Amino acid sequence: MTRTVLVARLDSAGDVLVQGPMVRAVAAGADRVVFLAGPAGAEAAALLPGVDEVWTWACPWILGDPPPVDAADLAALTDRVRALAPDEAVLSTSFHQSPLPLALLLRAAGVPRVSATSVDYPGSLLDVRHRADDDLPEPERALSLARAAGFDLPAGDDGRLAVRRPLPPVAHEPGYVVLHPGASVPARAWPPQRCAEAVVALSDAGYRVLVTGGPGERALTAAVAGARGTDLGGGTSLAQMAALLDGAAAVVVGNTGPAHLAAAVGTPVVSLFAPVVPAARWAPYGVPTVLLGDQDAPCRGTRARECPVPGHPCLSSVSAADVVAAVDKVVSS
């Protein structure tokens, strides 16, 4: 008899990537893993070892730009889950999200066993109500849920982040530095002028600099790359981005998806980390990392999407020279 487990994480690509150890633990005890992801996380879910199928659904209680609640959409997902008939579900959420609305939907679809981390009283919605230390790194927090549900990593798995290999070929000789200036949350982005200064400073220090960004960031990457960097804005899929980061000596990036993607391919990270969320939970996991940015700034712990402090001091205080010194450090580590 085939054992199918539905795993859910419904927010961004970075949030999905840090579920990698949990997914591998579930896959070690299941015959089939179906991953339910949000629109921004589906491409990342397809990169995770252990995932057999990815479903995409825009969740109205998780997404930062949520769609309206649509009864027909909820009914369609319920019907799809009922047809899948998973043996159980493992629902991963960040500390500020509730798994209970999705647990209710899955119960209505007939899922017999549901596990999640929840501080709220779950009634009959959860079979495993897990509690976790909020200061755990997110990959460890998710893995602790898998263990509470009865799954664990196979022998020899080091519990680090990972992606499926082989990765696509890259048209650049390895050893470059990738600078990724954008961020999905504006409060977590290093100012563009500082990014441009860092490209020049890194080039002066002898590094080849590739500047990356999504399709909507082409103007930003062009401005940051200038005449001294190579502009790759909007030119890579997530798998191609993983391959590009895999060939880098170091990655300079804010607290956003490519930081976790760099960790998943084992590349050192210079993390421009705005403290709107705790670094203890969200810093790049399992790779050499230098954390830059004032972690005691007034925005600390606010979870703000737009910087609440004039001048964005937590990151604007970081200089190009600081970045060069940090890159030198992680490259030599």
Image: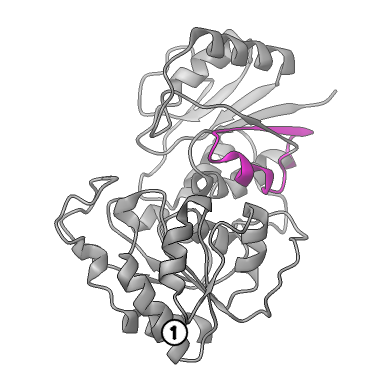
Q: Quadrant of residue 109?
A: top right
Q: Residue at x 75, y 66 (%)?
A: 169
Return the x and y of residue 323 as percentages of the image width and height: 37, 79
Residue located beneath label 1 in the image:
202
Q: Residues within 10 Å of mark 1 (few under 14, many from 20)?
A: many
Q: Residue at x 59, y 56 (%)?
A: 161
Return the x and y of residue 134 as percentages of the image width and height: 36, 44
| Stretch in magenta | 28-51
Q: Is residue 46 above or below residue 319?
A: above
Asked whether the viewer can see residue 267, the reply is: yes
Residue 221 placement, left or right of 312: right
Residue 182 shown in magenta: no
Circle 1: residue type: Leu
Return the x and y of residue 101 as percentages of the image width and height: 45, 18
Q: Is residue 125 above or below residue 12?
A: above
Q: Secondary structure at mark 1?
A: helix
Asked whether the viewer can see residue 333, the reply is: no
Q: Quadrant of residue 189?
A: bottom left
Q: 284 or 172: nearer the eye?
A: 172
Return the x and y of residue 144 as percentages of the image width and height: 52, 43
Q: Is residue 265 above or below residue 188?
A: below
